[in-house]
Image (cartoon, rainbow, N blue to C red):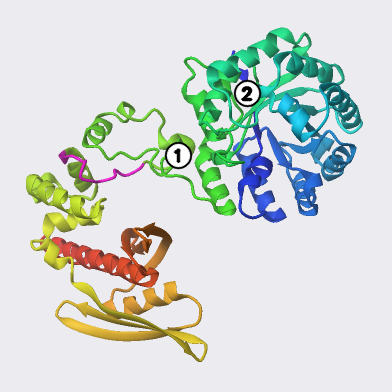
Amino acid sequence: MKENIIIFDTTLRDGEQSLLYSLTSLQKLKIAILLEKMGIDIIEAGFPISSPEDFKSVKLISKHIKNSKICSLARCIDKDIDTAYKAMKYSYNKLFRIHLFIGTSDLHIKYKLKKNFTDILDMSVRSVLRAKKYTDDIEFSCEDAVRTKIDNLCKIIEKVIEHGVTTINIPDTVGYTIPSEFSKIINNIMNRVPNIDKAKLSVHCHNDLGMASGNSITAIQNGARQIEGTICGIGERSGNTALEEIIMTINTRKDILNFKTNINIKNIYKTSKKISQICNFKISQNKPIIGKNAFSHSSGIHQDGILKNRKNYEIISPETIGSKKRDFNLTSRSGRAAIKFCMKNMGYSKEKYDLNKLYKNFIKLADKQGRVFNYDLESLAFTKNFYKENKYFKLIYLEILKKYDNKSKILIKLKCGKEIKKMSIFYKSSFVHSTLKLLRKISKINNIKLKRFSSESKNYKKNILNKVKISISYKKLNFYGEKITSSFTKSYVLSIINVLNSIRKYKIINKNFTNSQ
């Protein structure tokens, strides 16, 4: 029978500490609701003593969350413990957890706390007894546990369990250990603490050396039954254990990990995306499980293998975590099999185009622009003068004039085939949408909407370059544009013009193809 691993989420406490700004109470409540729907067992809602806003957030979350247990952090200080209780006392069914912590390594005791180990023992016991006045669910963290002398670590664990602690947490506070070392620490605790069976053993690993997930997995293999972490691994410095990695490791490696969780894994992708939006942080493209490239395939060998059997190069299907099956990334590394597959998906049988000719032109375009999209394939397959056709819309002149009755003026001169058109528009606030409106009018390509827009500045040889990426929808299809120049405004305008050229080619090709039927 599989043993259950308790999933303890600290996105709202440890995760928030890494953000550049504080989340509001309502934002935290939204995140807590997402975590509850995902099936998180315990939500560490905050550190109530740290600020009035944090107290307010913990109180609000405690009142609204019913299916996940709420937990608050507190130092081994009376006021911290009392404040944690006051913030959670309205919890559903009055069930909540107080999470005590204190530094136990010589480094923390001497330089941070300026005490001795006997003082730490006394403070710990006194704090546990105070917390027991409010709840029987008490977690105790030995901060910097992995750099604590093992004799001292075992001694303090035994003492706090004796006085009522129900969960012992072993944090790798600075992400210092490697799995083989961490497994010995967990083994020592399991074998040397006589009353360890009276409490759950938990681990809280940081990722400074990239070992957080590995250390967490080795911990449960050696006796830990609770894992603490955050969604997307956000947290202090290099972050925490990424819970989605742990959950999917347990789910995927059932052959060697005889464990289960209460998590609804189909909610993983949606929860991660929404939390990243609320917290305003970007998920790395190659982030395991939830990154944009996690299920993407660019190599021709990989794409061919995926077409024959997805298990050749995918150990998890995107649908498992609530994501969609990803399209291939068509690049210069892609092969004929991927090109043929994409054309078939668009409804073109192999008799309607020359695959060898298409592939030759595809490689040429891929070397020039990087990623190639489906609408590019259509153009390559059915446009005789592709590169000539690609420059139908061309920017001749761009100027931004400011302070016309508190308005700014965008002036664009655009070459449209053999004709040159010049138009302008006034705007007060949104340059982005006003520019799109103006280019829509000049090009006469209507029904286009801006779906996504991003920009970033980079220093290159003492110059600042502005990169703009956009996604524009047209007739339920997404078209992509990207440009880098020294000017943000010019990069944005040129990105749109790239898209307009792609849409125009798409319209011509589909019109010709329909007429030929």
**Mainly helix, strand or loop, the magenta region?**
loop
Q: Of the residues shown, which amino acid type is indicated by label 1?
A: Lys
467 inside magenta stretch: no
Name above or below for residue 357 compared with residue 147: below
- Neighbour tally class for label 1: few under 14, some 14-19, many 20 plus, Cα within 10 Å: some
Q: Sort mark 2 into few (<14), some (14-19) or many (20+) by Cα contacts within 10 Å.
A: many
Secondary structure under tag 1 reads: loop
Q: Which of the labelled discs sits on residue 287, or is there none?
A: 1
Please name the amino acid that badge 2 sits on.
Ile
- Is 334 magenta? The answer is yes
| Mark in front: 1 vs 2 | 1
Query: Which is more toward the observer, 177 or 375?
Result: 177
| Left or right of 344 in this view: 163 | right
Q: Residue furthest bottom?
A: 405
Q: Is residue 18 left or right of residue 392?
A: right
Span colored in magenta? 326-336
Quadrant in the picture for the N terminus: top right
Q: Which residue is mark 2?
A: 5
Disc 1 + disc 2, Cβ < 8 Å: no
Q: From the top left corner, tell me how far across and down residue 47 is, in percent.
A: 76, 43
Q: Position of residue 59 (x, y in %)?
A: 80, 47
The mark nearer the N terminus, 1 or 2, is 2
Would residue 53 appear left or right of 379 to someone viewing this image? right
Q: What is the distance, in whole Å, between disc 1 and disc 2 at their CAs? A: 23 Å
Question: In this view of the protein, which residue sits in the foreground, 499 or 446?
Answer: 499
Position in image of residue 81 (x %, y %): 86, 37
State the image quarter where residue 15 is shown: top right
